[in-house]
Image (cartoon, helix red, strand yellow):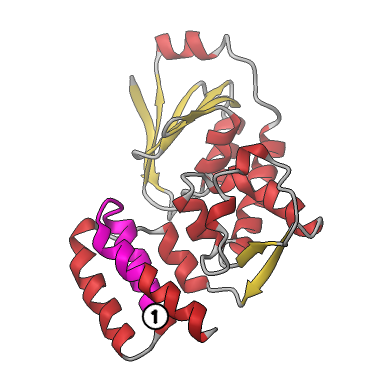
């Protein structure tokens, strides 16, 4: 395997890279650090890998990666394999679809949503998301806690909002949404617990909740964060927004 191009996504974006590979009719793979890879044959996108996903969902999710190293690799064995794969669609169409999802997520991620009473949730694939939309979490936090990925929920959430199955119940919270998309290091756990307790003593419930949620993201199996978060949510329910 030979690397023919390396760099950082901060300097050359994924759409620009894919257009370059198409213009040069490259057959190989574009590796995005540890995030995943996109496979191309004669410049056409023929496959994608991201964590445990592959194919279309993986490709769409890779467009949410905007930082970090990339490398374009080519090789004779790889070329033979990739040339037997069918294009996933036109590169331009796939790029436009992905960028639309990214734009929608920027708008949706900070929203605090809850189901409308007596509304039937019609998308079985999103069953894990429904309990997380509790009127307190942002959509970004709910998606993370449900074990889902943004590109798997965006269309269904848009349909639910259009069909009035979901409603916004609090102002958007971009800071919490951004934090959810950038989980803290486990070493930050106790600092976040301490910060949350300080906010709680000061009756700054929104700030306390944000700290405890981040602590829970840092160490999901720790009951300490869950207990403190439950206390904050109970206080918020009694005292109101």
In this orientation, which residue lies closer to the viewer: 40 or 104? 104
- Front-most of residues 36 and 44: 36
State the image coordinates of residue 61 (x, y, percent, origin top left). 53, 42
Give the labeled residue for mark 1: 207
* Residue 240 figure quarter: bottom right
Residue 157 as seen in the image, left or right of residue 241: right
User: Relative to residue 100, is residue 81 drawn left or right?
Assistant: left
Would you say residue 228 sits in the magenta stretch? yes
The part of the chain drawn in magenta is 208-229
Task: Please state the horizontal and vertical placement of residue 230, each as a whole percent of the image.
Answer: 38, 68
Residue visible at 60% across and 67% down in the picture: 111
Q: Residue at x 31, y 70 (%)?
A: 228
Eyeballing the image, is 168 above or below 126?
Answer: below
Q: Residue 182: horizontal and vertical position, in percent?
A: 38, 59
Q: In the picture provided, is 27 more to the left or to the right than 192? A: right
In this rendering, the count of numbered labels is: 1
């Amino acid at each position: 395997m030979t690397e023919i191009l390396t760099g950082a996504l901060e300097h050359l974006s994924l759409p620009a890279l894919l257009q370059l590979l198409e213009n040069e009719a490259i057959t190989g793979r574009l590796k995005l650090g540890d995030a995943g890879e996109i496979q191309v044959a004669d410049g056409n996108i023929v496959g994608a890998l991201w964590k445990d996903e592959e194919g279309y969902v993986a490709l769409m999710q890779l467009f949410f990666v905007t930082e970090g190293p990339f490398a374009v690799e080519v090789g004779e064995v790889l070329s033979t394999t990739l040339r037997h794969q069918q294009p996933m669609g036109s590169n331009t169409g796939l790029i436009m679809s992905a960028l639309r999802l990214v734009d929608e997520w920027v708008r949706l991620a900070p929203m605090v949503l809850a189901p409308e009473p007596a509304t039937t949730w019609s998308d079985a694939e999103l069953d894990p998301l429904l309990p997380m939309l509790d009127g307190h979490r942002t959509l970004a936090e709910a998606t993370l806690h449900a074990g889902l990925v943004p590109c798997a929920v965006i269309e269904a959430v848009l349909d639910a909002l259009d069909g009035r199955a979901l409603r916004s119940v609090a102002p958007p919270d971009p800071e919490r949404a951004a934090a959810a998309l950038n989980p803290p290091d486990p070493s930050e756990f106790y600092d976040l617990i301490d910060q949350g307790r300080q906010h709680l003593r000061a009756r700054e419930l929104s700030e306390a909740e944000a700290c405890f949620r981040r602590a829970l993201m840092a160490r999901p199996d720790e009951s300490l964060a869950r207990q403190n978060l439950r206390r904050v949510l109970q206080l918020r329910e009694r005292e109101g927004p």
